[in-house]
Amino acid sequence: MPPEKIEIFKSMEDWAKKNVLVHLKPVENCWQPQDFLPDAASDGFEEQVRELRERAREIPDDYFVALVGSMITEEALPTYQVMLNNLDGLRDETGSSLTPWAIWTRAWTAEENRHGDLLNKYLYLSGRVDMKRIEKTIQYLIGTGMDPRAENSPYLLFIYTSFQERATSISHGNTGRLAKAHGDTKLAQICGIIASDEKRHEAAYTKIMEKLFEIDPDGAVLALADMMRKRITMPAHLMYDGCDVNIFFHYSAVVQRLGIYTAKDYSDVLEFLVGRWKVEKMTGLSAEGRRAQDYVCRLIPKLRRLEERAGERAEEALTIPFSWISDRLVKL
C-alpha cells in the first residue's frame, strides 16, 4: 500500500480506540463453550451426553454436512489471524503490540476461537460424524491457507471481513433455526449465540469501512469494486478432506439447498453494505471512482438474476457420499 494510505490507518488509531474496541467484550462477560455442553466434572455427565445424542439422532445427515462445514471454517482461525496481522499499516509488530489495530486482531481472534471449540465438541459428543476425517480436513485447510485476494490491503480485507461476518451471522442463524425445526433447541441456542458474535464483529468491520468511505471515498469505492469483481469467496474455499477435491463446492451446494446460505443471501449482503456505506449517494469522486460506484450499484440486479439460475441447478442436484458422515449419501 502507498505510504499515504498507511498513514490514514495510523491517523485513525484514536478513532479506533473509541469506535472499534467497544465492539469487544471483556473475557469475564463472554460466554464459553462449557456453558452449552455436558459438564464432565458433574455426576450427571453421562446422562447429559445421552440426552445430547438422542436429540442429534433426529437430525438428518445433510444438516450435519452443513454444520461440519461451518465448524471447519471456524477452526481455520490461525489463517485468519495471520492474514490480519500481515496487513500494511495494521501489523502487530511485536505479537503483543498495544496499538488498537493489534488489540482488535488478537481479541477478535480470541472471541472467534470459542466458535470452533464449541461446535467441535458438540459434533464429537453427537456421535453422528466421523471426527478423524473431519480433523484431517481441518489440518489440510490450515496447512493450505486461503486467498481472499486482498493483497495485504486493509481496504480490501476490511470489505471482505464486513461481508464475511454478515454472511456467517446469516449462516449460523439459519443453521440454528433448522436445528430448532429438527427439535434440538440446545443446538439452536449454540448456533444463535455464535451468530450473535458474528453480528457484533460485523458492526466493527462495517464501521471501519464507513470511516474509510468518509476519509478516502475514492480509495474505498475502488476497493469495493475491486473485491466485488473478484467475488467474495468463503474463507474455507481451499477445503480438502483427503479424497474429494471438490468438497467445498459440494458442501456449498448442500448449504444452498437447505437455505442456510444462498445466492440470495450473497446479494442481500452486498445490498445491505452498499446501503450502509451510502455508496449510491457518494459525490465528489474521481472519474475512476464514479466508474467503480456505477459498477457496484449495477451489480446487485445482476446478482438477483443469478439467484434464479442457482435455483434451477438445485433441482438437478446429484447425490454423493461425504467423508465427514462416514460416506453416507447426501443430495447436493
Image: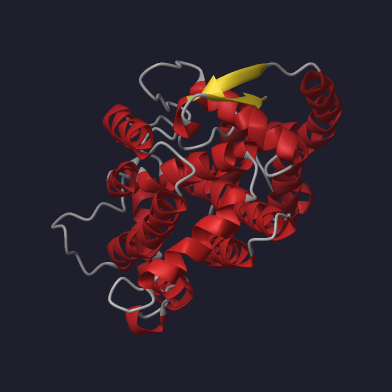
Residue 67 placement (x, y as % from top left): 54, 45
Q: Is residue 208 visible?
A: no
Pick the residue in front: 221 or 200.
200
- How was this image coloured? secondary structure
Q: Is residue 230 above or below residue 115?
A: above
Residue at x 55% of width, y 21% of height: 321
Residue 87 placement (x, y as % from top left): 32, 45
| Image quadrant where residue 105 sits | bottom left
Q: Determine whether, in the image, residue 129 is placed left or right of residue 170.
A: left
Q: Quadrant of the N terminus?
A: top left
Residue 147 placement (x, y as % from top left): 41, 29
Pick the residue in front: 152 or 27.
27
Q: Determine whether, in the image, residue 2 is placed left or right of residue 303.
A: left
- Label tally: 0
Q: Quadrant of the C terminus?
A: top right
Pick the residue in front: 235 or 154.
235
Residue 171 placement (x, y as % from top left): 63, 49
| Image quadrant where residue 240 sits | top left
Residue at x 51% of width, y 61% of height: 52
Q: Is residue 257 visible?
A: yes
